[in-house]
Image (cartoon, grey):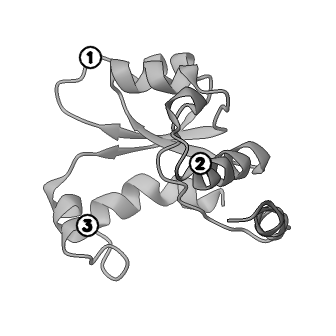
Amino acid sequence: MSSRRADELVGWLTTDATVVVDAGTLRHPAEQSGSGSGDDELRWRLAAEADRSVLVTRACYLALRRTVSLPVRPSGVVLVAEAGRALTRSDCERAIGAPVLATVAVDPEIARAVDAGMLRTRVPKGAIRALGRLSEGI
């Protein structure tokens, strides 16, 4: 994407309207290869210039280490809770420096809905309950 088009897109997305963008995985600048770097640049600009950015992550030591090494901090976190993890919600908040806005448990019903492409049309009740507070703030 050209720099001019990226500027236009970022300008449009940073208006007063509520816009949700799934920017995918933000790779550390040192990990970016020469190809596709325009996409990486756009993702970074969107994350850096957004009024509000939400990170979705697991309570995993490696995920938290990666997150704190990035130059952009999210304004909030959705924590994917997995059984057997030692790190707590407050550990994640302290490490990332942002509040956990919602916690979503790993749930086979949600996984099946995602795999079947049904998440947009039939959201599982567990996901609605877990993300209700997050969606109220948007």
**Circles 1, 2 touching at the beta carbon (< 8 Å):** no
The furthest residue to the bottom:
121
Q: Mark 1 Cα within 10 Å, few/some/many (few <14, many 20+)? A: few
Mark 2 to mark 3: distance in Å?
Answer: 28 Å
- Mark 2 vs mark 3: which is more N-terminal? 2
**Circles 2, 3 touching at the beta carbon (< 8 Å):** no
Q: SS at mark 1?
A: loop
Q: Mark 3 Cα within 10 Å, few/some/many (few <14, many 20+)? A: some
Identify which residue, 32 or 9, lies in the foreground. Answer: 32
Disc 1: which residue: 86
- Mark 3 vs mark 1: which is more N-terminal? 1
Disc 2: which residue: 37
Residue type beneath disc 3: Val
Disc 3: which residue: 114
- Circle nearer the viewer, 2 or 3: 2
Mark 3 to mark 1: distance in Å?
Answer: 26 Å
